[in-house]
Structure formats: structure tokens, C-alpha cells
Image (cartoon, helix red, strand yellow):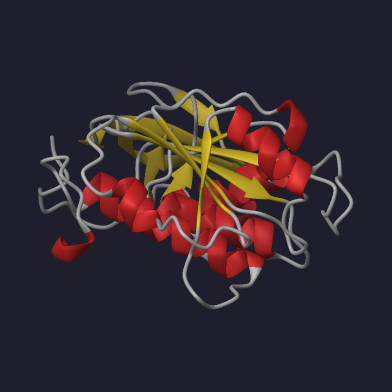
Amino acid sequence: MGNNQLIPKLNRFWAGDARPGHTLQLDPSEAHHLLHVLRLGEGDLISLINGKGQEFEGHIARIKGKKVWIKVLKLRRTEPPPKKEIIFILPLLKKDYTLFLAEKAVELGITKLQPFYNQHTVLRPTDHLRTKLEARSRQALKQCGRLWALTIEPLRPLWELEIPAERKIFAYEKETSLSLKTVLNGFKGQSLALLSGPEGGFTPEEAQRLREKGFIAVSLGPYVLRAETAAFYLMSLAHAWAYLDPNGLFSFRSL
């Protein structure tokens, strides 16, 4: 099965343990959406995604109060694993920007999200961030049709990060000579790590520490970008590198 098949559209729900012939109970948030937003009933067909490259067809077998059970009928669609790994190291940002960027990361094919905080982080870290990021990313997964879940790592301080990738880049407001184009053009590797800073940017000591860990500082152009804009910009270029250039000869001239 492939993504190019014409498959009737069904409402998608998250079910990490879905498999044909199995009856499962939907997560409470998914059940709420099914019952009170879509107003589906017993016998209705739905789609289930497990975040592991598979989408299944199922029907609503039983509803009791706020609980919903689904009978998984058959495999509908599969998706191969991503050929390239894109790790995005995301700053903890004010308002809803961190959650918003987790959603965009799913849509743009980022494979792993590593949230972090540093000396200039404005928002105070919370214990529930990872749960919120996973919930938001799963909603985006269902909406955009992607079948591989975004891996979300626990929130960590910048100075503790150890990121294995063939090329590691961080956007630094004090870098003026080295452009992202120079660093990415012709890069044929299979893993890329991108890091953008919080509202207050990086201290000189943090920038030096990143360089010592193999990160290359780049400029994002002549204008000052808001933290959320810089992150979204980097994600978009990572998408171009991974998905718009199958021959691995990424060039800005080809976009």
C-alpha cells in the first residue's frame, strides 16, 4: 500500500497499539472528539494511526458513557520511514509558540524535537510540557496525513544537550559572515540538527559551548527575526533539504 492510492477519507484518530482484529479503547481525549465534536455513533467507520507508519480502518464497536471501543478491521495505508533524520532543537518560548512549532514540525517532516531552555529563556519550564507537545503533535499528525510520529525528547538545559548528527547548525544573531546557504549547499548526509534560540538569544559563552560541541553558527540574513520566525524558517529549509531534493544535492538555486 502506498500514499498515492485513492482511499476514501475517514476521520482519523490516534491509537498507538492498533492492529487488525484487535478491539481497543480510545484515549479519553480522542473519545471526546469522536462523541462531542464529530458526533459519531456505533457502527461508524473511522481511521486509526499508530505513529509507526501504519493507518488502519476500524468501526465503533461500543459506546458507554464517555468511553469508546473500536474494532480494528484492516490495514488501510503504510508509509516508509523517513530517509533523512531532522532533529530540531526548539527553545522554550512565550505564549503558545512552542506548541505551535511542534505542530509545524510535524507538518514539515521533522523527525525529532528536542526542547531546551537556556540563560535567556523567559518562560519558566513546567513538568507537563512534553505531554502537551505530544498531544499537539498527534493532532497535527492526524490532520496532515503523516504516519510516523514526531519523537519528542524531555526538556533539557542547553548546556546538557548531546546531539548526534552529521551536520549541526545553530542560528546566531551575532554571526554575520557565514550563511545557511554556504553550510547546507551540497550537503549529502542523512542527519541534520538545527537549533534556534529563545527571545533573548544566546550568551557568548553558550555560543562558544555550542561550537565546541560541533555546531556551526550561521546568519539568517540581514533582518532581526522573532524567535518563533527563526525556528519556523529553519524547519522550512530542513523540509526543502529532506523532501524537495531526492538526489541529496541541495542547492538554494533549485528552490
Tell which of 121 and 94 is nearer to you: 121
**Residue 28 on image: x %, y %:** 67, 43
- Residue at 59% x, 35% y is 211
The answer to whether 219 is drawn above or below residue 7 in the figure is below
The single residue placed furthest to the bottom in the displayed view is: 223
Horizontal side of 227 relative to 243 (left or right) equals right
Residue, far front: 177
When the figure is inspected, residue 91 is found, relative to residue 131, above or below; the finding is below
Against 187, is 165 above or below? above
Query: In this image, 31 relative to 47: left or right?
Result: right
Q: Quadrant of the C terminus?
A: bottom left
In depth, the one of 140 and 28 nearer the eye is 140
Pinpoint residue 191: horizontal percent, then vertical percent.
Answer: 36, 31
**Residue 37 horizontal side relative to residue 105, left or right:** right
**Which residue: 75% across, 48% down?**
204
Total numbered badges shown on the rendered structure: 0
Looking at the picture, does residue 152 appear above or below residue 121? above
* Residue 25 in the image, given as x and y percentages of width and height: 57, 32
Q: Residue at x 36, y 47 (%)?
A: 183
Q: Position of residue 13 (x, y in %)?
A: 47, 46
- Residue 11 in view of the camera: no
Q: Is residue 179 visible?
A: yes
Pick the residue in front: 117 or 8: 117
Nearer to the camera, 225 or 36 = 225
* Quadrant location, the N terminus: top left
- Residue at x 25% of width, y 49% of height: 185
